[in-house]
Image (cartoon, helix red, strand yellow):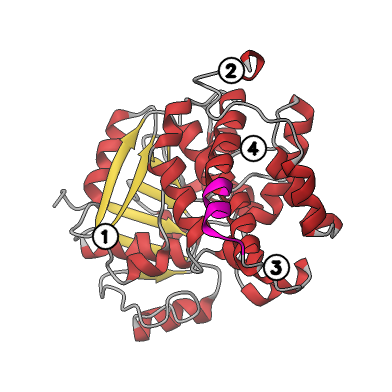
Amino acid sequence: MADSKRIAVLGGGSFGTIIANVAAENGHQVRLWMRDQARADEIRTSRVNSRYLPGYTLADTLEPVCDLQQALADAEIVFVSIPSHAFREVTRQARRWLQPGQMVISTTKGIEAETFSLMSEILHDELGEDARIGVLSGPNLAKEIAKRQLTATVVASADAELRATVQAVLHCAYFRIYASDDHYGVELGGTLKNIYAIAAGLSSALGMGENTKAMLMTRSLAEMSRFAVCMGANPMTFIGLAGVGDLIVTCMSPLSRNYRVGYALGQGKSLEEAVAALGEVAEGVNTLKRVKAKAEELNIYMPLVWGLYEVVFNKAPVAEVVKTLMLNEQSTDVEFVLPREQV
């Protein structure tokens, strides 16, 4: 086990709670910040976050707090697990109590609506270019980690010491952390796959076959990597945990929030009904809207994004959209092997 560290986790949702508890069980001093005093009191007395992880017992040493200054006091490492729509606001509140040298790691998979900023970019905006920043992303369904099922993730940062520290702090018998220096690619992988999880849920509800699912996932990976490379990421990142690994788990598991939204849409529910039934944030809905706009701006070929957007936001019949997709240009399988213009 690593030397004991002082850690703050901002955000008491499912993944924030998991990260806080893994670190606490590893012997670190952990404060879990959340806005809801009643939920903090519940954790303090029952050691359970019943809203997000019922039945998952939290370490006695994990300290739930609602005071942001108290959470951040003397923290060496700060994990930010806040939904993307509130990420900048919380970061801006926190920066007055953050100190130079602290390591700040985002675990949020999303895009800020107004700026198309990823969470690491928001951290740099608010904390300065010299801040020590990383991202944590991978095929990490919180409910499976809560059951201590074997799981791996990726910590990405240009800061080698930050990568090694996060690996040491979170590694345990069931949670393994790999390292990358392509933080933009790792973050984009975790963000973009949410879109395709909606498509996977939709196709499952409609009874589509295994051939269709295989085509959907591999073409999704092609679109993700095509978009990411245009944005400056390394395409090789997408053959790892943060790319294809995360895509597989979110496209195949009913535990995925975005998959469940897609499944509800496939059952005939409206987008509003699907999101309301979920009761949690499904980042893919807003990500779909932002990525479609950015792809059009940059002229990036993303037919699955276009088709899903028509179904989700314009209520287009799925059969008609599928027909259009199947009549689209037949291009290369892997564009980084055979570029589109060479077909």
What is the three-letter code of the residue carrying label 1?
Leu
User: Which residue corresponds to mark 2?
Assistant: 339
**Marks 4/2: CA distance?**
28 Å
User: Which residue corresponds to mark 3?
Assistant: 266
Q: Report the magenta residues as a range.
A: 208-216
**Marks 4/3: CA distance?**
30 Å
User: Which residue corresponds to mark 4?
Assistant: 117
Query: Which sits in the foreground, 66 or 193?
Result: 193
Per the image, is 56 magenta?
A: no
**Percent coordinates x, y for residue 133 in the rendering:** 43, 36
Nearest to N terminus: mark 1 or mark 2: 1
For the question of whether residue 234 can be seen, the reply is yes
Q: Secondary structure at mark 3?
A: helix
Query: Which sits in the foreground, 338 or 137?
Result: 338
User: Which residue corresponds to mark 1?
Assistant: 150
**Percent coordinates x, y for residue 182 in the rendering:** 43, 29
Number of other residues with Cα within 10 Å of mark 4, as a class: few under 14, some 14 to 19, many 20 or more: some
Number of other residues with Cα within 10 Å of mark 3, as a class: few under 14, some 14 to 19, many 20 or more: many
Q: Secondary structure at mark 2?
A: loop
Front label number (1 vs 2) = 2
Nearest to N terminus: mark 2 or mark 3: 3
Query: Which sits in the foreground, 93 or 289?
Result: 289
What is the three-letter code of the residue carrying label 4?
Ser
Locate the C terminus and report the quarter of the image it occupies: top right
Going by the picture, which residue comes out furthest to the top?
A: 342
Q: Residue at x 44, y 62 (%)?
A: 15
Going by the picture, which residue comes out furthest to the bottom?
A: 46
**Marks 1/3: CA distance?**
31 Å
Contact? badges 1 and 3 (CB < 8 Å): no
**Marks 4/1: CA distance?**
32 Å
